[in-house]
Image (tube, rainbow, N blue to C red):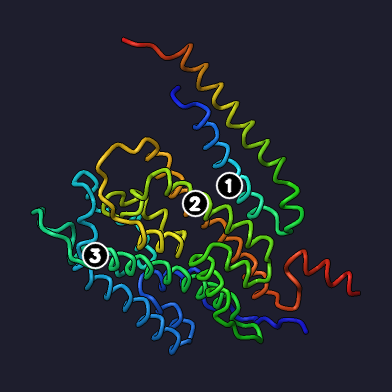
Amino acid sequence: MSVQRASTPGPSPDFAAILTWFVPGAGHLYLGKALLGVVAFVAVQGLYLVGIRLSEGRLFEFLEPDLQGPLAGGLSPEVGNLGALVWHMKAYGFGPGIPRPWPSHIHLGSWLTAASGMLNACLMLHAHLLARRRGTSRSLSLRPALQVLAGWLVPGLGHALQRRFTRAAVVFVLLVGLFALGTALAEGSNLDRERHFYYWGGQFLLGAPAMIAEVLHGHARVVRDIPYVDAGLVMGCLAGLLNVLALLDVFAQAEARALSPDVPAVVQERGRVQATA
Amino acid sequence: MKDLPIHLLLFAFVGLVISGLNAVFADPDDASALRSLPRRCLWFFGGCGVLAVLILLAERFLARTW
């Protein structure tokens, strides 16, 4: 069955994605998916607000004074939820500049605000894909966004959900191995957003392995020189950044399947079909 | 350089991961992506080697101290 496309121009995919970037769920409302839009708004902003509550909005006080500029949040994972990040910066900024104790759950709070950015980035992908599917005879499930989210949470899981198991294993072993080696070299000192704000942002992109390592070994006091701390920091951050490539690969596959569901998109599948024929 | 073999080993591992992810990203077929890994590693380490030589030459002939 061929996919039928409408002759009239549909909604703009870019506009839907940008709307979602500023206000989670707004892109889905624009595309006529009101319920999904409301649920997305509540989930993403709820995550951010709980994070703010736990950290008392003091996340950007982690930054050294010379890094506290108007674009300081631009390289943090929270940038995926731009509207909330701008509000956060306006409402709390960099604090009064007076040393005071951190809230007890500030690290959990910072994970939640960062996760809100990642979740909204997945919703942006979904809104973009949804707009491109408008005018076809099929609806679009949340599967492409969930596969990308799974690939963030556990490197390789997105590929596994697409039944690309070899690729999933390669991605998992390489990235988690690189992160583990980096963490060992840095003796766990990399697992602290207060100490390494931007490197932490890179590591965050590795998802659960970084989170579990931080829960188990993070925030330790450094009482002596660590010989390979710089190499460890770079390796941990690089593992997260390389996971973005893996996520793009997951999305490309999900996108190909979503836009032409009748055509097998993976070469292996093509081979299997030919073999069956 | 201090601990040169350790630095080279770490660089080799990082290079392997980068080349591996490059193969995964560039090739949709698992088998051919894995087959292309040695070639990609060769290009990566060759390119880095050329860059290192250029930097050393620039340092040798262009850098000066006041």
User: Which numbered tag is attached to residue B17?
Assistant: 1
Q: Is residue B55 above or below residue A115?
A: above
Query: In the rendering, which numbered label is found on residue B64?
Result: none
Tell me where residue A100 appears, x and y as whole percent: 10, 57
- Amino acid bearing label 3: Ile
Q: Chain of mark 2?
A: A
**Chain for numbered disc 3:** A
Image marks 2 and 1: residues in contact by CB distance under 8 Å: yes
- Residue type of the residue flagged with mark 1: Val
Q: CA distance from mark 1 to mark 3?
A: 33 Å
- The residue that mark 3 highlights is A106
B62 or A135, which lies in front? B62
A86 w.r.t. B33: above or below:
below
Q: Residues within 10 Å of mark 3 (few under 14, many from 20)?
A: many
Query: SS class of the residue under badge 3?
Result: helix
| Callout 1 crowding tier (Cα within 10 Å): few <14, some 14–19, many ≥20 | many
Q: Residue at x 35, y 57 (%)?
A: A217
The residue where tag 2 is placed is: A239
